[in-house]
Amino acid sequence: MRFLIISDPARNDFYGYLLPGLQRKGEVFLLWDYAKKYANVSVDTIPPGVTILYWNQFSTPFQLLKKIKPDRILFFEILDLWQIPLVIACHHFKITCFFVDHGVGNKVEVMKERFKENPPLYKKLIFFLKKSLTATKKILKSQGFFFSAAKFLDKASCSRYFKLLFYLRFYSPIEALSKLKFRERTPHYAILFNKNNIEPFIFYNEIERENIFTDGVPFFDKYFVQRLEVGSHIVFIEHPYLEESILKWDSKFHEEIARSLEQFAKKNQLKLVVKLHPRSDINNWLRYNLDSDYIVIKQKEDITKEIQSAKIILGYSSTLMNVFIQLKKNIVLLGWHPDPMIFGDDLSKTGLCHVSYSIEDLFTKFSEWQSVNLAEKNTNLYLDFLYNYNYPLDGKATERVINAILVNEAP
């Protein structure tokens, strides 16, 4: 079989768990960047045995399908003028395609709140004009690719399809898509991992419920063990707020967080593991020369064992925090921002984790956090949470995802 994955090659954390199973069945291709010169991944990071493709190699979705002859296409994102027409072509030519989630999605209310982050129109127009001057060929080619798929649509869907060109200029991608739903631009099947992800997905997509799979989160399989041992160290799950210039983060606030963690670890004679996000710049942490006897900075390393045995895990709202609750770890959800808030799903509302809005809480509430593990204490709340977010939790979700990809055919 031939599998085409539409995902950033650098984000192995999105698709890496699929590769062993898919490569045992055939060839795997990765398609993401427009051209090789724009690629954000080096040769040594490309997964072995995977062929990298670029959008500029193809003039139309039909040409792409004819040349690659994929049996399955896996989309990890369907937001631009390349991905959307390819999905439409898959429907027309009955090439089985899937949307594969890569996390535990935000609730619809959170998604709507994030629409407010859409830059002002004048900034988007300035960006578009600059891009038009520097990447005219790329823009023209993407629009040609986009228009070529219109012939596969009926009149009603075609009208929504063309409107997308303008809506994507004025709105964020998710908001634009939520206003212009039609079945042909959503893959045949959606692998969403859990029931919580269904409502956010159908908020901006049209798909039959029976074509949605929610049989567990595969990249949580590695964390599954029958019994967890608890050590004496703490783990801090970092996010790239500074690098992405959001939520008013600046270098001063970033350093304040880092220095406070160091001070706390020293005061309590604890080892504190800082796990950096893949998009974070590790140099932003190394420049502080934090005491390595107490602070350990890790980014690409596998910290599964440290997570499983951590006494307490401090972290911002994310997919990882979700799985740590499932493991019944003692969690503190963080709202440590210049303007204190929970950015993303407020998991503290589940009653299964603590919450903190100030770094000062480390010094005043740590004993309280340490003494009560809410995920272990509130059994019924925990079972409800597990049912909605990762059921069944048995370490076999990857097998179920691979099987769904292999056995399901385009209607």
Image (cartoon, rainbow, N blue to C red):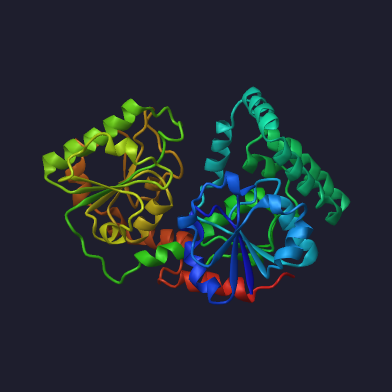
Toward which corner of the image does residue 25 lie, by quadrant? bottom right
Q: In terms of depth relative to the viewer, which is nearer, 211 or 301?
A: 301
Q: Residue at x 55, y 60 (%)?
A: 192
Name above or below for residue 260 compared with residue 34: above
Q: Residue at x 72, y 35 (%)?
A: 136
Q: List x then y, in percent, for residue 189.
A: 65, 64
Q: List x then y, in percent, for residue 258.
A: 26, 36
Q: In terms of depth relative to the viewer, which is nearer, 15 or 103?
A: 15
Q: List x then y, in percent, for residue 38.
A: 58, 44
The quadrant of the image that shows the N terminus is bottom right
Judge from the rendering whether residue 385 lies leftward or rightward of residue 33; answer left or right. Answer: left
Name above or below for residue 209 compared with residue 128: below
Name above or below for residue 363 compared with residue 190: above
Q: Residue furthest right?
A: 155
Q: In terms of depth relative to the viewer, which is nearer, 140 or 383?
A: 140
Q: Residue at x 59, y 29 (%)?
A: 119
Q: Is residue 183 visible?
A: no
